[in-house]
Amino acid sequence: MPRYLDPKGDVVFKKIFSQHPHLLKSFLNAVLPLPENGLIDSLEYLHPEQIPEIPALKRPIIDVKCKDSNGRIFIVEMQIEWTDAFKQRLLFNSSKAYVKQLQKGEEYHLLNPVYGLGILASVFDRDSDDWYHHYRIVNVGKPERVIEGLQLVFIELPKFKPVNISQKKLQVLWLRFMKEINEKTQTIEPELLKVPEIREAISLTEEAGYTPQELEAYDKYWDAVSTEKTLWTGRFDEGIEKGRQEGREEGREEGREEGSRSEKISLAKKLLAEDFSLEKISQLTGLSSEELKDLVS
């Protein structure tokens, strides 16, 4: 029985999508919001530019950059743990790819659309059950009016469930492949094997096809992910405890302030009974004239 590796790991992801353009083409046609008459015909890999790393992440983010026969550019990134900086990074990466199409002196009508695709192995929008997030530039008052050029898509794999009959069948199968195949997989659903491209992608996840060096890199990647999760959990717990301590201290301080105020009011009432002037009482207690007038009334 073959042992499978997780396609979300960088070594496996790159073996599938960075070395086999026909598999990447099938995947992008399935998951991107492309019109039926505008599907990708062929792909050419482009050299990914050096993008600033996210400081919170110690690992590089998987990055695949390619161009189709119509000049459209596609950027695909796989992210295991969500951080808001990832969203900005994909926007930066996609925007830069859009701008850098033109050489000096060339006209803007030569610009081709750029699609940024972020595949997420974690949840970033906890206020919604939506797993597919499509962003484009629209007129806020009239959203049907669109400025073409840049589109971003984020897919949350943990939320994905193939239950909506309106979903494209190939989209469902590719996302099932990304979500379900891992080291625990023992049998492959026949439906996945019926699609030649997905069947080939599954074969590329078989452990037997990897060198010892690749397997070591694969294990190190997931070790780094595990360490990263532990660090994030630790920081989160530390933040909660710090908040509790600050809350307790703030409560004690408020208690001290309230006690001090009560003592001042009690003293002010006694001084008022002795016919001290409001000005003198204010000097002795630190209470304002308005506060003392409230006591008088």
Image (spheres, rainbow, N blue to C red):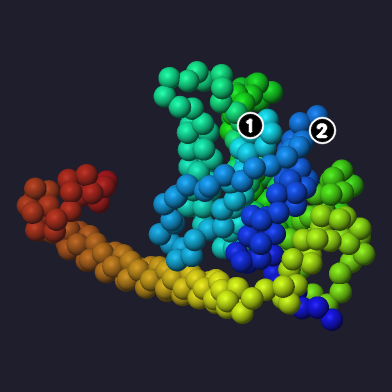
* Residue drawn at x 48%, y 32% as measured from the top left: 99
Front-lying residue, 19 or 132:
19
Answer above or below: position of 290 versus 104.
Answer: below
Left or right of 249? Residue 49 is right
* Label 2: how many Cα within 10 Å (few below 14, some 14–19, many 20+): few
Mark 1: which amino acid? Gly
Is residue 255 among what the camera can see?
no
Mark 2: which amino acid? Glu
* Residue drawn at x 35%, y 68% as measured from the top left: 246
Front-lying residue, 121 or 60:
60
Residue located beneath label 2 in the image = 36
Residue located beneath label 1 in the image = 71
Is residue 80 among what the camera can see?
yes
Q: Quadrant of residue 152?
A: top right
Q: Marks 2 and 1, how far apart in space?
A: 17 Å
Sequence-wise first label, 2 or 1: 2
Q: How many marks?
A: 2
Answer above or below: position of 272 versus 9.
Answer: above
Q: x, y (%) of residue 230?
A: 51, 75
Q: Secondary structure at mark 1?
A: loop
* Residue drawn at x 75%, y 52% as measured from the top left: 23
Q: Secondary structure at mark 2?
A: helix
